[in-house]
Amino acid sequence: METNRIIGQYTSNNKGPLLIVTAGVHGNEPSGIQALKAVFEKLHREHPIINGTFIGILANTAAAKNGVRFIDEDLNRTWTDKNLKQRNNDTSEKREMFQLIEVLESLNDTNFTNHYFMDCHTTSSDSLPYMSVQDVGQNLKWAQQFPLHIIKGFSDIVEGTIDGYFSKKEITGFTIEAGQHDSETSKIYHEGMIWMLLEKACNLYVKDLESTPSTIEATVKSTNKQRTFKIIHRFGLTPKDNFKMQSGFENFQPIYNGQHLATLNGTEIYSTWDAFIFMPLYQAKGNDGFFVIESIE
């Protein structure tokens, strides 16, 4: 197994599930990596009992080393059926993808009772933390056990995501977007969610720890009441596009029909919805200008 890709691994050698947490799919999103390191440090120092095995994996080693979103292409768009079938290693991200698959396949040697995943991300704009869930298998039911807002439909609109790959492999889980890239609270929410995953998936009893992680309470309090949203529109971009989002938008911010949202190649883009903005693009690289979502609960 690639040791430079494994952030940490922990088990009490009890039968149970495999819990996989990936971080650094985008190399400019360090908080998931930092949160995993903090959790593993506490686990190995205090040795609480868990069922199964917990492993943290660095997804895009080259991009993380360089502190950039990606080297050649977005690693969260490479997991397409075409790429997986052709096994073409012509980009850095495709090579990372196939190396990740080797790591994941090496973990199947053990007879686990279940398989769970969480993929850690952050956003270029300020945001409440939320879970992005592909509504297949047990994913939605599992996500509803955690306190954050839920977004449905991202992987149905965007092809080649790592959580889409996990879901096709019948591994239950979701992506967490913990907040803005450089926000201290992003690390807090990533860490809080990891601890809650360990509680619910691996039967960690947090009171066995020397102190209950404050990140758990902070994550629970981050969201007043869980709501579920679905994506109703994606504003996609090509590499040649000159896109500029209007300033000041945040995830889950209400938008109204006729509101100026962005400028694309010199043309102003106006909303045709009374809904909510989602993932407005405020960084140089990206395949999506913004999404529009509506509440379904």
Image: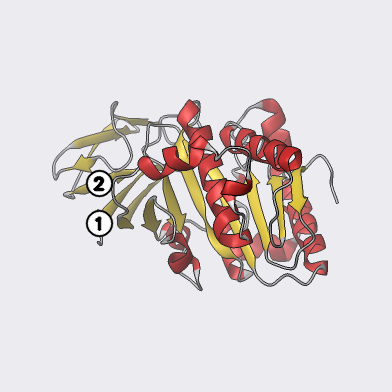
Q: Nearer the viewer, residue 91 or 22?
A: 22
Q: Is residue 92 above or below residue 297?
A: above
Q: Amino acid at mark 1?
A: Ser
Residue at 59% x, 53% y is 205
Image x and y of residue 166, in percent: 61, 62
Label 1: how many residues lie within 10 Å, few (<14), some (14-19) or many (20+)?
Answer: some
Can see residue 239? no
Measured as percent of width and height from the top left, residue 182 is found at 50, 26
Q: Where 112 falls versus 184 (above or below)?
A: below
**Which label is found at residue 167?**
none
Name the kind of residue labelled 2 in the image. Phe
Which residue shows up at 29% across the image and 49% down it?
Answer: 292
Residue sitting at x 57%, y 33%: 31
Q: CA distance from mark 2 to mark 1?
A: 8 Å
Residue tagged 2: 276
Q: Which residue is mark 1?
A: 295
User: Which secondary structure lies at badge 1?
Assistant: strand
User: Which is more toward the observer, 53 or 143?
Assistant: 53
List x then y, in percent, for residue 144: 41, 61
Q: Position of residue 66 (x, y in %)?
A: 69, 26
Tag 2 near tag 1, CB within 8 Å: yes
